[in-house]
Image (spheres, rainbow, N blue to C red):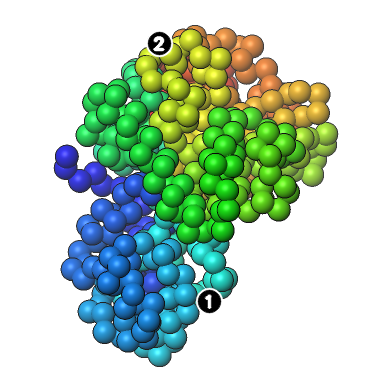
């Protein structure tokens, strides 16, 4: 398979011009090493190599000084203490673009490290492939939704939604076309993630309970984060639950989506929602492996909503104009799946898994438009048809195919 250009690539090249250290962080197997190796840097070491790891651990100063630079240091989360040595080296000889680190945990997830590299490090987050990246299109869905859709009206955007949802975005899956091989890949991924990344980041005493909690949280994707229920079902005390959930967040398995809140909007629900960051893994955990199983599943609505969330999350990491991502829900049950907050305007996004769309699907979006007329830019309902339609001023029915 040829190398797929990642949308974040331009941001990376900019960071390298202005920072001595760049961290590419993201979940295991999202393509961090592949991306780093396509930056034109010849020198590469990985802390997965036990010899390299021991050298860096036992003599960190000598290790950093003797590396040929610029250099890629892969799997940097294995040795968080190396960040202190990096800081000392950079403070003595600051040259931008010298170190590219990759890590399958966010910097907040590195034990004992807070801001030792503040002002010296640029951080980019790499997510699984978006539909746009799979099709090698350069447009960004966050930028498109924030702009004018007039030129897209009545155009066709076909999409095999089931295939995209079941496959998810991990690059390796593009090479796999058999459901059984895909099943084996996901099983192996989850086991390796739990035995490696999760264990590195937390002192997990009971691996079985972590696995139970991981599954319980993931299959609640698209729902309100009911911490008490999850904690009780997983049989964990509060402190352990908090620690395990933080590991899932720091390793990019799950994301919290906060509620939209502007002062003029009262009576809003304050609890976040949670989303799995990949629908392939989510479907695997729900034991959904085919188009028919997805169509029959009670969870189909939540899965499709998760798919749209993941596409927005991925696009936002490389958008020209990033948006705040939120959901909207009032105490009297008016709900909108996503609010894109661009600062001076908001775009409301609903997700419908059906093939058709009607004006009633926009009812809560109309309510928001009345509540916030000065900020409201447009309302969008994603649906399973092929044609992008304008229902009336500022209200659009947008096919899932528009995401790709």
Quadrant where the image shows the N terminus? top left
Of the numbered discs in the image, which one, if any, rests on residue 173? Answer: none
Image location (x, y in percent) of residue 145:
48, 34
Q: Which residue is mark 2?
A: 292
Horizontally, residue 368 falls left or right of residue 50, namely right
Is residue 202 among what the camera can see?
yes
Crowding near the residue tagged with mark 1, few <14, some 14–19, many ≥20 C-alpha atoms within 10 Å? some
Front: mark 1 or 2: 2
Residue 276 screen position, x and y as percent: 52, 36
Whichever of labels 1 and 2 marks the residue nearer the N terminus, that label is 1
The residue drawn where x is 38% and y is 20% is: 289
Find residue 116 and name its label: 1
Q: Residue at x 66, y 51 (%)?
A: 240
Front residue of 373 and 164:
164
Q: Is residue 150 above or below residue 323?
A: above
Instruction: Judge from the rendering whether residue 325 lies leftward or rightward of residue 86; answer left or right.
Output: right
- How many residues crowd mark 2 within 10 Å: few (<14), some (14–19), many (20+)? few
Expressed as whole percent of the image width and height from the top left, the position of residue 121 reads 44, 71
Tag 1 secondary structure: loop
Comparing 9 with 341, the one in front is 9
């Amino acid at each position: 398979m040829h190398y797929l250009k990642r949308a974040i690539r331009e941001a990376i090249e900019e960071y390298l011009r202005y920072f001595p250290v760049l961290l590419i962080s993201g979940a295991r197997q999202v393509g961090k090493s592949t991306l780093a190796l396509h930056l034109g840097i010849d020198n590469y070491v990985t802390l997965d190599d036990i010899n390299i790891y021991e050298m860096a651990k036992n003599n960190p100063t000598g290790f950093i000084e003797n590396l040929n630079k610029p250099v890629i240091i892969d799997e940097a989360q294995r040795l968080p203490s190396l960040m202190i040595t990096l800081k000392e080296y950079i403070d003595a000889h600051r040259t931008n673009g010298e170190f590219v680190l990759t890590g399958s945990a966010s910097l907040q997830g590195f034990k004992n490290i807070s801001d030792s590299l503040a002002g010296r490090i640029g951080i980019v987050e790499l997510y699984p492939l978006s539909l746009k990246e799979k099709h090698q299109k350069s447009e960004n869905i966050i930028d498109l939704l924030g702009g004018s859709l007039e030129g897209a009206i009545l155009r066709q955007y076909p999409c095999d939604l089931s295939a995209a949802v079941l496959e998810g975005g991990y690059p390796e899956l593009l090479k796999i076309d058999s459901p059984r091989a895909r099943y084996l890949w996901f099983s192996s991924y989850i086991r390796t993630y739990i035995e490696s990344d999760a264990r590195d980041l937390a002192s997990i005493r009971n691996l079985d309970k972590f696995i139970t909690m991981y599954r319980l949280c993931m299959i609640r994707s698209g729902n309100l984060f009911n911490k008490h229920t999850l904690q009780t079902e997983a049989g964990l005390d509060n402190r352990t639950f908090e620690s395990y959930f933080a590991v899932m967040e720091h390793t990019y398995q799950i994301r919290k989506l906060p509620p939209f809140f502007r002062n003029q909007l009262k009576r809003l629900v304050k609890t976040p929602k949670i989303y799995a960051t990949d629908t392939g893994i989510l479907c695997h955990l729900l034991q959904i492996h085919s188009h028919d199983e997805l169509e029959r599943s009670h969870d189909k609505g939540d899965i499709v909503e998760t798919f749209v969330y993941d596409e927005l999350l991925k696009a936002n990491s490389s958008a020209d104009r990033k948006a705040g991502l939120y959901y909207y829900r009032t105490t009297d049950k008016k709900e909108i799946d996503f609010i894109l907050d661009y600062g001076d305007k908001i775009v409301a996004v609903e997700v419908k898994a059906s093939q058709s769309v009607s004006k009633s699907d926009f009812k809560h979006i109309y309510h928001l438009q009345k509540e916030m007329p000065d900020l409201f830019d447009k309302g969008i309902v994603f649906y399973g048809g092929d044609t992008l339609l304008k229902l009336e001023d500022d209200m659009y029915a947008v096919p899932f195919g528009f995401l790709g």
